[in-house]
Image: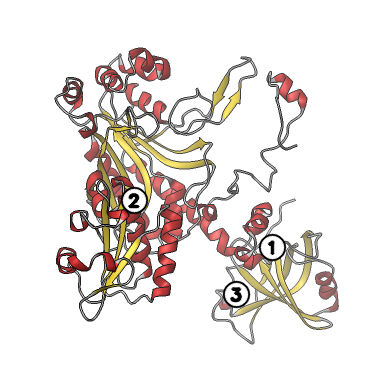
Protein backbone atom coordinates (compact mmCIF):
# COMPACT_ATOMS: atom_id res chain seq x y z
CA UNK A 1 0.00 0.00 0.00
CA UNK A 2 1.29 3.48 -0.81
CA UNK A 3 2.15 5.37 2.36
CA UNK A 4 0.94 8.86 1.54
CA UNK A 5 2.17 12.05 3.18
CA UNK A 6 1.29 15.67 2.63
CA UNK A 7 4.68 17.05 3.70
CA UNK A 8 8.12 15.79 4.63
CA UNK A 9 9.64 16.29 8.06
CA UNK A 10 11.70 19.30 7.04
CA UNK A 11 8.95 21.18 5.23
CA UNK A 12 6.48 22.66 7.70
CA UNK A 13 6.87 26.31 8.68
CA UNK A 14 4.99 28.93 10.67
CA UNK A 15 2.78 29.68 7.67
CA UNK A 16 1.47 26.09 7.81
CA UNK A 17 -0.11 26.64 11.24
CA UNK A 18 -3.71 25.45 11.23
CA UNK A 19 -3.25 22.91 8.42
CA UNK A 20 -4.09 19.24 8.74
CA UNK A 21 -1.06 17.22 7.61
CA UNK A 22 0.24 13.68 7.27
CA UNK A 23 3.88 12.93 8.05
CA UNK A 24 5.80 9.65 7.86
CA UNK A 25 9.17 8.72 9.30
CA UNK A 26 11.15 7.07 12.09
CA UNK A 27 10.45 7.73 15.75
CA UNK A 28 13.80 9.16 16.69
CA UNK A 29 13.18 10.06 20.29
CA UNK A 30 10.46 10.25 22.94
CA UNK A 31 10.48 12.51 26.00
CA UNK A 32 7.62 11.76 28.36
CA UNK A 33 6.54 14.68 30.54
CA UNK A 34 3.46 13.19 32.16
CA UNK A 35 1.23 10.16 31.98
CA UNK A 36 -0.47 11.39 28.83
CA UNK A 37 1.99 13.98 27.55
CA UNK A 38 5.15 13.49 25.50
CA UNK A 39 7.33 15.10 22.88
CA UNK A 40 8.13 12.80 19.95
CA UNK A 41 10.73 13.56 17.30
CA UNK A 42 9.79 12.18 13.89
CA UNK A 43 12.63 11.90 11.38
CA UNK A 44 12.61 11.18 7.66
CA UNK A 45 15.17 11.59 4.88
CA UNK A 46 14.67 15.36 4.84
CA UNK A 47 14.71 16.35 8.50
CA UNK A 48 12.75 16.24 11.77
CA UNK A 49 9.43 17.50 13.12
CA UNK A 50 8.27 17.62 16.72
CA UNK A 51 5.06 15.73 17.49
CA UNK A 52 3.27 16.62 20.75
CA UNK A 53 1.25 13.75 22.22
CA UNK A 54 -1.50 14.98 24.55
CA UNK A 55 -4.10 12.21 24.77
CA UNK A 56 -4.21 8.79 26.40
CA UNK A 57 -5.05 7.13 23.07
CA UNK A 58 -2.03 8.59 21.28
CA UNK A 59 0.20 7.96 24.29
CA UNK A 60 -0.71 4.28 24.37
CA UNK A 61 0.37 3.93 20.75
CA UNK A 62 3.70 5.67 21.40
CA UNK A 63 4.36 3.56 24.49
CA UNK A 64 3.74 0.38 22.50
CA UNK A 65 6.57 0.93 20.02
CA UNK A 66 10.35 1.20 20.30
CA UNK A 67 12.47 4.00 18.96
CA UNK A 68 13.27 3.72 15.22
CA UNK A 69 9.85 2.27 14.44
CA UNK A 70 8.26 3.89 11.40
CA UNK A 71 5.06 5.87 11.89
CA UNK A 72 2.47 7.81 9.98
CA UNK A 73 1.20 10.81 11.93
CA UNK A 74 -1.95 12.67 10.98
CA UNK A 75 -2.47 15.89 12.87
CA UNK A 76 -2.79 19.64 13.13
CA UNK A 77 0.12 22.07 12.73
CA UNK A 78 0.40 24.64 15.49
CA UNK A 79 2.90 27.22 16.68
CA UNK A 80 5.41 26.05 19.27
CA UNK A 81 5.35 27.80 22.61
CA UNK A 82 9.09 27.18 23.03
CA UNK A 83 10.72 27.67 19.65
CA UNK A 84 14.01 26.11 18.53
CA UNK A 85 15.82 28.50 16.15
CA UNK A 86 18.43 25.83 15.36
CA UNK A 87 15.88 23.69 13.48
CA UNK A 88 14.18 24.59 10.18
CA UNK A 89 10.92 23.27 11.69
CA UNK A 90 11.64 24.79 15.09
CA UNK A 91 8.72 27.21 15.08
CA UNK A 92 5.98 24.60 14.72
CA UNK A 93 4.81 21.26 16.09
CA UNK A 94 2.14 18.75 15.14
CA UNK A 95 -0.64 17.64 17.48
CA UNK A 96 -1.64 14.16 16.27
CA UNK A 97 -5.20 12.98 15.75
CA UNK A 98 -4.02 9.58 14.47
CA UNK A 99 -0.78 7.58 14.66
CA UNK A 100 -0.25 4.44 12.62
CA UNK A 101 2.64 2.04 13.11
CA UNK A 102 3.99 1.24 9.64
CA UNK A 103 7.09 -0.73 10.58
CA UNK A 104 7.77 -1.89 14.10
CA UNK A 105 11.32 -1.91 15.50
CA UNK A 106 11.43 -5.17 17.45
CA UNK A 107 14.52 -4.30 19.50
CA UNK A 108 14.38 -2.16 22.60
CA UNK A 109 18.14 -1.64 22.57
CA UNK A 110 19.86 -0.40 19.39
CA UNK A 111 23.49 -1.26 18.50
CA UNK A 112 24.27 2.44 18.87
CA UNK A 113 22.50 5.76 19.19
CA UNK A 114 21.57 6.77 15.64
CA UNK A 115 22.62 10.41 15.86
CA UNK A 116 25.94 9.44 17.45
CA UNK A 117 26.72 6.44 15.26
CA UNK A 118 30.00 7.95 14.09
CA UNK A 119 31.29 7.56 17.63
CA UNK A 120 30.51 3.82 17.61
CA UNK A 121 32.94 0.99 16.92
CA UNK A 122 33.53 0.70 13.18
CA UNK A 123 32.71 -3.01 13.17
CA UNK A 124 29.27 -2.25 14.59
CA UNK A 125 28.75 0.58 12.13
CA UNK A 126 29.53 -1.66 9.18
CA UNK A 127 27.47 -4.58 10.48
CA UNK A 128 24.45 -2.30 10.94
CA UNK A 129 25.22 0.07 8.10
CA UNK A 130 21.51 0.57 7.34
CA UNK A 131 21.16 2.06 10.84
CA UNK A 132 24.39 4.05 10.52
CA UNK A 133 23.03 5.61 7.32
CA UNK A 134 19.98 6.89 9.20
CA UNK A 135 22.31 9.35 10.94
CA UNK A 136 21.92 12.63 9.02
CA UNK A 137 25.65 13.31 9.41
CA UNK A 138 26.44 10.02 7.66
CA UNK A 139 23.67 10.35 5.10
CA UNK A 140 24.88 13.77 3.96
CA UNK A 141 28.10 12.24 2.57
CA UNK A 142 26.09 9.87 0.38
CA UNK A 143 23.93 12.76 -0.82
CA UNK A 144 27.11 14.70 -1.56
CA UNK A 145 28.40 11.76 -3.57
CA UNK A 146 25.19 11.65 -5.64
CA UNK A 147 25.37 15.37 -6.34
CA UNK A 148 29.04 15.24 -7.32
CA UNK A 149 28.52 12.30 -9.68
CA UNK A 150 25.59 14.12 -11.30
CA UNK A 151 27.70 17.27 -11.70
CA UNK A 152 30.60 15.30 -13.21
CA UNK A 153 28.26 13.59 -15.66
CA UNK A 154 26.65 16.88 -16.67
CA UNK A 155 30.03 18.54 -17.21
CA UNK A 156 31.39 15.69 -19.34
CA UNK A 157 28.29 15.62 -21.54
CA UNK A 158 28.59 19.37 -21.95
CA UNK A 159 32.14 18.85 -23.29
CA UNK A 160 30.91 16.45 -25.95
CA UNK A 161 31.80 13.16 -24.27
CA UNK A 162 29.62 10.08 -24.76
CA UNK A 163 28.83 7.92 -21.74
CA UNK A 164 29.58 4.34 -22.78
CA UNK A 165 29.58 1.35 -20.44
CA UNK A 166 32.28 -1.28 -20.81
CA UNK A 167 32.22 -4.98 -19.80
CA UNK A 168 32.44 -6.17 -16.22
CA UNK A 169 33.30 -9.75 -17.16
CA UNK A 170 36.53 -9.67 -19.14
CA UNK A 171 39.92 -11.33 -19.48
CA UNK A 172 42.59 -11.32 -16.82
CA UNK A 173 45.22 -8.70 -17.60
CA UNK A 174 48.57 -7.94 -15.93
CA UNK A 175 47.80 -4.36 -14.86
CA UNK A 176 49.65 -4.26 -11.55
CA UNK A 177 47.14 -5.38 -8.91
CA UNK A 178 45.57 -8.77 -8.25
CA UNK A 179 42.50 -9.66 -10.28
CA UNK A 180 39.20 -10.83 -8.93
CA UNK A 181 38.55 -14.01 -10.90
CA UNK A 182 35.15 -15.39 -11.88
CA UNK A 183 34.94 -19.06 -12.94
CA UNK A 184 33.36 -19.65 -16.37
CA UNK A 185 30.76 -22.41 -15.93
CA UNK A 186 30.58 -23.21 -19.64
CA UNK A 187 34.34 -23.24 -20.02
CA UNK A 188 35.80 -25.52 -17.32
CA UNK A 189 39.20 -24.43 -16.07
CA UNK A 190 38.87 -20.92 -17.49
CA UNK A 191 38.08 -17.68 -15.71
CA UNK A 192 36.77 -14.23 -16.36
CA UNK A 193 38.29 -11.33 -14.45
CA UNK A 194 36.57 -8.25 -13.08
CA UNK A 195 38.23 -5.21 -14.69
CA UNK A 196 40.89 -3.40 -12.70
CA UNK A 197 40.00 -0.48 -14.95
CA UNK A 198 38.35 -0.11 -18.38
CA UNK A 199 41.77 0.80 -19.79
CA UNK A 200 41.90 -1.48 -22.81
CA UNK A 201 38.23 -1.07 -23.66
CA UNK A 202 38.39 2.72 -23.73
CA UNK A 203 41.46 2.61 -25.95
CA UNK A 204 39.64 0.19 -28.23
CA UNK A 205 36.76 2.68 -28.38
CA UNK A 206 39.21 5.30 -29.64
CA UNK A 207 40.42 2.84 -32.28
CA UNK A 208 36.78 2.16 -33.18
CA UNK A 209 36.27 5.82 -34.02
CA UNK A 210 34.56 7.23 -30.94
CA UNK A 211 36.04 10.64 -30.32
CA UNK A 212 35.30 11.28 -26.64
CA UNK A 213 34.32 8.63 -24.10
CA UNK A 214 33.57 8.68 -20.39
CA UNK A 215 31.82 6.68 -17.72
CA UNK A 216 31.55 6.57 -13.95
CA UNK A 217 33.34 3.25 -14.05
CA UNK A 218 33.45 0.53 -11.38
CA UNK A 219 36.92 -0.96 -10.96
CA UNK A 220 37.90 -4.08 -9.05
CA UNK A 221 41.27 -4.77 -7.46
CA UNK A 222 42.19 -7.33 -4.85
CA UNK A 223 44.38 -5.03 -2.80
CA UNK A 224 44.72 -4.00 0.82
CA UNK A 225 42.77 -1.13 2.29
CA UNK A 226 44.14 2.17 3.55
CA UNK A 227 42.69 5.54 4.47
CA UNK A 228 42.22 6.74 0.89
CA UNK A 229 41.65 3.36 -0.78
CA UNK A 230 38.79 0.94 -0.34
CA UNK A 231 39.48 -2.77 -0.83
CA UNK A 232 37.65 -4.62 -3.55
CA UNK A 233 35.96 -1.98 -5.66
CA UNK A 234 36.06 1.71 -6.38
CA UNK A 235 34.70 4.15 -8.93
CA UNK A 236 36.46 6.56 -11.26
CA UNK A 237 35.57 9.23 -13.78
CA UNK A 238 37.07 7.33 -16.69
CA UNK A 239 37.68 9.37 -19.86
CA UNK A 240 39.56 9.12 -23.13
CA UNK A 241 39.99 11.49 -26.10
CA UNK A 242 40.98 10.64 -29.66
CA UNK A 243 43.39 12.81 -31.68
CA UNK A 244 44.39 14.40 -28.39
CA UNK A 245 47.44 14.95 -26.24
CA UNK A 246 48.32 15.91 -22.71
CA UNK A 247 47.19 19.53 -22.95
CA UNK A 248 43.77 18.49 -24.24
CA UNK A 249 43.19 16.26 -21.21
CA UNK A 250 44.43 18.96 -18.86
CA UNK A 251 42.09 21.55 -20.38
CA UNK A 252 39.03 19.35 -19.82
CA UNK A 253 39.69 18.57 -16.15
CA UNK A 254 40.83 22.10 -15.39
CA UNK A 255 37.42 23.24 -16.59
CA UNK A 256 35.37 20.44 -15.01
CA UNK A 257 36.82 20.10 -11.50
CA UNK A 258 37.32 23.59 -9.96
CA UNK A 259 33.61 24.59 -10.11
CA UNK A 260 32.58 21.27 -8.57
CA UNK A 261 35.14 21.56 -5.78
CA UNK A 262 34.20 25.18 -5.13
CA UNK A 263 30.47 24.36 -5.04
CA UNK A 264 30.42 21.10 -3.11
CA UNK A 265 33.63 21.18 -1.11
CA UNK A 266 34.12 21.72 2.58
CA UNK A 267 36.35 24.59 1.46
CA UNK A 268 35.03 27.15 -1.01
CA UNK A 269 38.37 27.95 -2.66
CA UNK A 270 39.81 25.75 -5.44
CA UNK A 271 42.74 26.27 -7.80
CA UNK A 272 42.02 28.18 -10.96
CA UNK A 273 43.16 26.91 -14.34
CA UNK A 274 45.79 26.27 -15.42
CA UNK A 275 46.90 24.01 -12.58
CA UNK A 276 50.56 24.15 -11.67
CA UNK A 277 52.71 21.60 -13.54
CA UNK A 278 55.63 19.99 -11.70
CA UNK A 279 58.09 17.52 -13.22
CA UNK A 280 58.37 14.28 -11.27
CA UNK A 281 62.08 14.76 -10.45
CA UNK A 282 61.43 18.33 -9.31
CA UNK A 283 58.55 17.19 -7.10
CA UNK A 284 60.73 14.59 -5.41
CA UNK A 285 63.56 17.08 -4.87
CA UNK A 286 61.40 19.99 -3.71
CA UNK A 287 58.60 18.24 -1.83
CA UNK A 288 59.87 14.70 -1.22
CA UNK A 289 56.75 13.31 -2.86
CA UNK A 290 55.12 12.86 -6.25
CA UNK A 291 51.83 13.92 -4.65
CA UNK A 292 52.76 17.15 -2.86
CA UNK A 293 50.31 19.05 -0.69
CA UNK A 294 50.79 22.58 -2.02
CA UNK A 295 48.88 24.09 0.88
CA UNK A 296 52.09 23.62 2.89
CA UNK A 297 54.78 26.27 2.34
CA UNK A 298 57.72 24.08 3.45
CA UNK A 299 60.23 22.71 0.93
CA UNK A 300 62.99 20.13 1.00
CA UNK A 301 66.62 21.23 0.74
CA UNK A 302 69.69 19.14 -0.02
CA UNK A 303 72.44 19.28 2.59
CA UNK A 304 74.54 16.32 1.42
CA UNK A 305 77.54 18.48 0.55
CA UNK A 306 77.22 20.46 3.78
CA UNK A 307 77.76 17.37 5.95
CA UNK A 308 80.19 15.45 3.74
CA UNK A 309 83.06 14.00 5.75
CA UNK A 310 81.38 14.33 9.14
CA UNK A 311 82.03 11.24 11.27
CA UNK A 312 78.38 10.32 11.77
CA UNK A 313 76.93 7.12 10.24
CA UNK A 314 73.84 8.67 8.56
CA UNK A 315 76.16 11.13 6.77
CA UNK A 316 78.38 8.37 5.36
CA UNK A 317 79.62 8.64 1.77
CA UNK A 318 76.98 7.50 -0.70
CA UNK A 319 74.07 8.64 1.42
CA UNK A 320 71.81 11.54 0.46
CA UNK A 321 70.94 13.99 3.24
CA UNK A 322 67.80 16.13 3.04
CA UNK A 323 66.58 18.91 5.31
CA UNK A 324 63.21 20.55 5.93
CA UNK A 325 63.49 23.97 7.60
CA UNK A 326 60.52 25.11 9.69
CA UNK A 327 60.68 28.77 10.63
CA UNK A 328 59.20 30.20 13.83
CA UNK A 329 58.75 26.74 15.34
CA UNK A 330 57.65 26.94 18.97
CA UNK A 331 57.16 23.21 19.50
CA UNK A 332 58.51 22.00 22.85
CA UNK A 333 60.98 19.12 22.98
CA UNK A 334 58.26 16.65 23.94
CA UNK A 335 56.10 17.72 21.01
CA UNK A 336 59.07 17.45 18.62
CA UNK A 337 59.78 13.92 19.84
CA UNK A 338 56.16 12.95 19.22
CA UNK A 339 56.22 14.30 15.66
CA UNK A 340 59.51 12.49 15.02
CA UNK A 341 57.94 9.24 16.24
CA UNK A 342 54.91 9.75 14.00
CA UNK A 343 57.20 10.37 11.03
CA UNK A 344 59.13 7.18 11.81
CA UNK A 345 55.92 5.12 11.82
CA UNK A 346 54.88 6.44 8.41
CA UNK A 347 58.29 6.68 6.73
CA UNK A 348 59.95 3.63 8.24
CA UNK A 349 63.02 5.53 9.43
CA UNK A 350 63.43 8.01 12.28
CA UNK A 351 64.41 11.53 11.22
CA UNK A 352 66.98 13.69 12.99
CA UNK A 353 66.69 17.31 14.06
CA UNK A 354 68.38 20.41 15.42
CA UNK A 355 67.36 24.02 15.86
CA UNK A 356 68.81 27.56 15.91
CA UNK A 357 68.41 29.21 19.33
CA UNK A 358 68.31 32.86 20.39
CA UNK A 359 72.09 33.01 20.72
CA UNK A 360 72.57 31.99 17.09
CA UNK A 361 73.86 28.51 17.97
CA UNK A 362 72.73 25.13 16.68
CA UNK A 363 71.28 23.15 19.58
CA UNK A 364 69.42 19.92 20.30
CA UNK A 365 69.22 16.65 18.42
CA UNK A 366 72.24 16.07 16.18
CA UNK A 367 73.66 19.58 16.63
CA UNK A 368 76.82 18.26 18.33
CA UNK A 369 77.92 16.73 15.01
CA UNK A 370 77.52 20.05 13.19
CA UNK A 371 79.41 22.51 15.40
CA UNK A 372 82.47 22.95 13.18
CA UNK A 373 80.22 23.75 10.17
CA UNK A 374 77.65 25.74 12.04
CA UNK A 375 77.85 29.01 10.10
CA UNK A 376 78.01 27.30 6.70
CA UNK A 377 74.85 25.36 7.54
CA UNK A 378 73.06 28.47 8.82
CA UNK A 379 73.94 30.38 5.64
CA UNK A 380 73.19 27.55 3.18
CA UNK A 381 69.81 26.67 4.73
CA UNK A 382 68.84 30.30 5.37
CA UNK A 383 68.25 29.72 9.08
CA UNK A 384 66.87 32.36 11.40
CA UNK A 385 66.32 32.27 15.16
CA UNK A 386 63.58 29.79 16.06
CA UNK A 387 64.06 27.56 13.00
CA UNK A 388 63.66 23.82 13.48
CA UNK A 389 65.57 21.69 10.96
CA UNK A 390 64.44 18.12 10.44
CA UNK A 391 66.86 15.84 8.58
CA UNK A 392 66.57 12.56 6.67
CA UNK A 393 69.44 10.47 5.34
CA UNK A 394 69.91 7.30 3.32
CA UNK A 395 69.67 6.19 -0.28
CA UNK A 396 68.41 9.03 -2.44
CA UNK A 397 64.82 7.90 -2.94
CA UNK A 398 64.44 6.84 0.70
CA UNK A 399 65.85 10.17 1.93
CA UNK A 400 63.50 12.06 -0.38
CA UNK A 401 60.43 10.13 0.73
CA UNK A 402 61.23 10.53 4.42
CA UNK A 403 61.72 14.25 3.85
CA UNK A 404 58.30 14.30 2.19
CA UNK A 405 56.71 12.79 5.29
CA UNK A 406 58.61 15.29 7.45
CA UNK A 407 57.26 18.15 5.34
CA UNK A 408 53.66 16.96 5.66
CA UNK A 409 53.80 16.25 9.38
CA UNK A 410 55.56 19.45 10.39
CA UNK A 411 53.50 21.53 7.96
CA UNK A 412 50.37 20.33 9.72
CA UNK A 413 51.81 20.48 13.26
CA UNK A 414 53.45 23.93 13.25
CA UNK A 415 51.02 26.86 12.97
CA UNK A 416 51.46 29.21 10.03
CA UNK A 417 52.82 26.74 7.48
CA UNK A 418 49.63 25.24 6.07
CA UNK A 419 46.65 27.03 4.52
CA UNK A 420 44.14 24.27 5.19
CA UNK A 421 40.87 25.65 3.90
CA UNK A 422 41.40 25.41 0.16
CA UNK A 423 41.85 22.84 -2.62
CA UNK A 424 45.24 23.05 -4.33
CA UNK A 425 45.58 21.08 -7.57
CA UNK A 426 48.72 20.31 -9.50
CA UNK A 427 49.84 18.08 -12.34
CA UNK A 428 52.88 15.87 -11.86
CA UNK A 429 54.41 15.30 -15.30
CA UNK A 430 57.48 13.76 -16.96
CA UNK A 431 57.47 10.48 -15.06
CA UNK A 432 60.39 8.12 -15.73
CA UNK A 433 59.57 5.53 -18.38
CA UNK A 434 61.93 2.93 -16.90
CA UNK A 435 63.56 2.02 -13.60
CA UNK A 436 65.85 -0.66 -12.23
CA UNK A 437 63.76 -3.27 -10.44
CA UNK A 438 64.59 -3.68 -6.75
CA UNK A 439 64.29 -7.47 -6.92
CA UNK A 440 65.42 -8.19 -10.47
CA UNK A 441 68.14 -5.58 -10.78
CA UNK A 442 67.04 -5.32 -14.42
CA UNK A 443 65.45 -2.54 -16.45
CA UNK A 444 61.69 -2.51 -15.92
CA UNK A 445 58.75 -0.25 -16.76
CA UNK A 446 58.37 2.34 -14.05
CA UNK A 447 54.61 2.82 -14.36
CA UNK A 448 52.30 2.20 -17.32
CA UNK A 449 54.04 0.30 -20.15
CA UNK A 450 51.53 1.69 -22.65
CA UNK A 451 52.36 5.35 -22.09
CA UNK A 452 53.98 7.11 -25.04
CA UNK A 453 57.68 7.72 -24.38
CA UNK A 454 58.57 11.40 -24.74
CA UNK A 455 60.46 11.55 -28.02
CA UNK A 456 58.67 8.53 -29.49
CA UNK A 457 60.55 5.89 -31.44
CA UNK A 458 63.68 8.03 -31.86
CA UNK A 459 64.47 8.13 -28.15
CA UNK A 460 63.96 4.36 -27.84
CA UNK A 461 66.32 3.69 -30.72
CA UNK A 462 68.96 5.91 -29.12
CA UNK A 463 68.61 3.99 -25.86
CA UNK A 464 68.89 0.69 -27.72
CA UNK A 465 72.06 1.91 -29.45
CA UNK A 466 73.57 3.00 -26.13
CA UNK A 467 73.55 6.68 -27.06
CA UNK A 468 71.45 7.59 -24.04
CA UNK A 469 70.66 5.98 -20.70
CA UNK A 470 67.16 4.47 -20.82
CA UNK A 471 66.64 5.69 -17.25
CA UNK A 472 66.61 9.25 -18.61
CA UNK A 473 63.62 8.55 -20.86
CA UNK A 474 60.43 10.15 -19.61
CA UNK A 475 56.87 9.15 -20.44
CA UNK A 476 53.96 11.33 -21.50
CA UNK A 477 52.31 10.33 -18.26
CA UNK A 478 50.77 12.57 -15.64
CA UNK A 479 49.14 12.46 -12.22
CA UNK A 480 46.47 14.79 -10.91
CA UNK A 481 47.07 15.69 -7.26
CA UNK A 482 44.88 17.63 -4.84
CA UNK A 483 45.91 18.49 -1.27
CA UNK A 484 48.47 15.70 -1.22
CA UNK A 485 46.05 13.06 -2.52
CA UNK A 486 46.63 11.43 -5.90
CA UNK A 487 43.27 11.69 -7.63
CA UNK A 488 44.33 10.04 -10.85
CA UNK A 489 46.99 8.81 -13.21
CA UNK A 490 46.71 9.33 -16.94
CA UNK A 491 48.81 9.29 -20.07
CA UNK A 492 49.15 9.90 -23.74
CA UNK A 493 48.82 6.34 -24.99
CA UNK A 494 51.37 4.45 -27.04
CA UNK A 495 49.14 3.82 -30.06
CA UNK A 496 51.86 2.85 -32.55
CA UNK A 497 52.72 -0.90 -32.68
CA UNK A 498 56.32 -0.17 -33.75
CA UNK A 499 56.91 2.13 -30.78
CA UNK A 500 55.14 -0.31 -28.48
CA UNK A 501 57.31 -3.26 -29.53
CA UNK A 502 60.51 -1.23 -29.20
CA UNK A 503 59.48 -0.05 -25.71
CA UNK A 504 58.99 -3.66 -24.64
CA UNK A 505 62.21 -4.83 -26.26
CA UNK A 506 64.21 -2.58 -23.94
CA UNK A 507 62.91 -4.64 -21.00
CA UNK A 508 63.68 -7.88 -22.87
CA UNK A 509 60.13 -8.60 -24.00
CA UNK A 510 59.29 -9.03 -27.65
CA UNK A 511 56.37 -8.73 -30.04
CA UNK A 512 55.13 -12.20 -29.13
CA UNK A 513 54.88 -11.17 -25.47
CA UNK A 514 52.84 -8.09 -26.34
CA UNK A 515 50.54 -10.10 -28.59
CA UNK A 516 50.07 -12.76 -25.94
CA UNK A 517 49.30 -10.36 -23.08
CA UNK A 518 47.28 -7.74 -24.96
CA UNK A 519 46.02 -9.39 -28.17
CA UNK A 520 42.91 -7.28 -28.80
CA UNK A 521 44.60 -3.93 -28.28
CA UNK A 522 47.71 -4.80 -30.27
CA UNK A 523 45.70 -6.14 -33.20
CA UNK A 524 43.39 -3.12 -33.14
CA UNK A 525 46.33 -0.73 -33.28
CA UNK A 526 47.55 -2.53 -36.40
CA UNK A 527 44.40 -1.32 -38.18
CA UNK A 528 45.24 2.35 -37.77
CA UNK A 529 44.78 3.89 -34.34
CA UNK A 530 44.43 7.61 -33.62
CA UNK A 531 46.73 9.31 -31.14
CA UNK A 532 44.74 9.35 -27.91
CA UNK A 533 45.06 10.28 -24.27
CA UNK A 534 43.03 9.93 -21.13
CA UNK A 535 42.78 9.92 -17.38
CA UNK A 536 40.48 8.56 -14.67
CA UNK A 537 40.11 10.63 -11.47
CA UNK A 538 38.89 8.55 -8.53
CA UNK A 539 35.34 9.46 -7.57
CA UNK A 540 35.68 8.01 -4.07
CA UNK A 541 38.83 10.02 -3.29
CA UNK A 542 37.29 13.12 -4.84
CA UNK A 543 34.21 12.93 -2.62
CA UNK A 544 36.39 12.13 0.41
CA UNK A 545 38.27 15.39 -0.17
CA UNK A 546 35.07 17.34 -0.75
CA UNK A 547 33.51 15.99 2.43
CA UNK A 548 36.65 16.68 4.46
CA UNK A 549 36.83 13.04 5.59
CA UNK A 550 39.99 11.14 6.50
CA UNK A 551 38.60 7.69 5.70
CA UNK A 552 37.21 6.73 2.32
CA UNK A 553 34.70 4.40 3.99
CA UNK A 554 32.77 7.44 5.19
CA UNK A 555 31.64 8.33 1.67
CA UNK A 556 30.80 4.84 0.36
CA UNK A 557 27.21 3.65 0.92
CA UNK A 558 28.12 0.06 1.81
CA UNK A 559 31.88 -0.20 2.37
CA UNK A 560 33.91 -3.25 3.25
CA UNK A 561 36.15 -3.30 6.29
CA UNK A 562 39.95 -3.25 6.17
CA UNK A 563 40.02 -7.01 5.59
CA UNK A 564 37.78 -6.75 2.51
CA UNK A 565 34.78 -8.18 4.35
CA UNK A 566 31.18 -7.05 4.04
CA UNK A 567 30.09 -7.54 7.65
CA UNK A 568 26.49 -6.62 6.90
CA UNK A 569 25.97 -9.18 4.10
CA UNK A 570 28.48 -11.73 5.39
CA UNK A 571 30.71 -11.66 2.33
CA UNK A 572 32.87 -13.42 1.37
CA UNK A 573 30.97 -16.53 2.37
CA UNK A 574 31.12 -20.28 2.01
CA UNK A 575 29.03 -21.61 -0.91
CA UNK A 576 27.31 -24.94 -1.37
CA UNK A 577 29.16 -27.88 -2.84
CA UNK A 578 26.59 -28.01 -5.66
CA UNK A 579 27.68 -24.55 -6.79
CA UNK A 580 31.33 -25.56 -6.74
CA UNK A 581 30.56 -28.71 -8.75
CA UNK A 582 28.74 -26.68 -11.42
CA UNK A 583 31.82 -24.47 -11.76
CA UNK A 584 34.26 -27.37 -11.77
CA UNK A 585 36.00 -26.01 -8.69
CA UNK A 586 37.59 -28.09 -5.97
CA UNK A 587 38.70 -26.45 -2.75
CA UNK A 588 42.00 -27.98 -1.63
CA UNK A 589 41.94 -26.61 1.90
CA UNK A 590 39.86 -24.18 3.88
CA UNK A 591 41.20 -21.98 6.63
CA UNK A 592 37.79 -20.67 7.70
CA UNK A 593 34.38 -22.25 7.44
Q: Which residue lies under the disc numbered 2?
A: 401
Name the residue: 68% across, 65% down: 23
Q: Return the disc, 1 or 3, that comes first in the chain's sequence.
A: 3
Between circles 3 and 2, the one closer to the viewer is 2
- Relative to 257, is 9 above or below? below
**Residue 16 — which label?**
3
1 and 3 marks in contact (CB < 8 Å): no
Q: How is the image coloured?
A: secondary structure
> Counting other residues with Cα less than 10 Å from the Cα at mark 2, is it few (<14), some (14-19), or many (20 or more)?
many
Asked whether 59 or 548 is in front, the reply is 548
In terms of sequence position, does the residue under pointer 3 or pointer 2 come before the other? 3
Q: Is residue 15 visible?
A: yes
Q: Nearer the viewer, residue 412 or 20?
A: 412
Q: Residues within 10 Å of mark 1 (few under 14, many from 20)?
A: many
Q: Is residue 170 depicted above or below 364 in this figure?
A: above
Rendered view: 82 above or below 229: below
Alpha carbon separation for disc pair 2 and 1: 55 Å
Q: Visible in this render: residue 292?
A: no
State the image coordinates of residue 153 (x, y, percent, origin top left). Answer: 41, 44
Amino acid sequence: MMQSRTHNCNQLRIENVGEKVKLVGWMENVREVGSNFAFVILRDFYGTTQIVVETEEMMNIIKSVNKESTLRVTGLVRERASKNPKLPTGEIEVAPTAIEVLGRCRYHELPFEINRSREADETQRLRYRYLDLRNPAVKKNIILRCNVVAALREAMLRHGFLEITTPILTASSPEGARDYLVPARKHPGKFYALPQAPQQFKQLLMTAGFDRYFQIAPCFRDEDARGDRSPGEFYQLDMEMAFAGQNDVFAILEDVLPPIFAKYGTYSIASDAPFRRIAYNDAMETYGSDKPDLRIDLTVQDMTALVAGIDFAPFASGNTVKAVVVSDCKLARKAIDKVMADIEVQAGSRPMWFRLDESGALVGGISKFLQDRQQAIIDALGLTVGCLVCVSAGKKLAAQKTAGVIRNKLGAAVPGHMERERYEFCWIVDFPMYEIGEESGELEFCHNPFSMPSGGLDVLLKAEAGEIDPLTITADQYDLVCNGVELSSGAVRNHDPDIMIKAFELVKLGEDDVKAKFPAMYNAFCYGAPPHAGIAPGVDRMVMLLAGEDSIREIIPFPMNKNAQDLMMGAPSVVEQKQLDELNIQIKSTVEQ
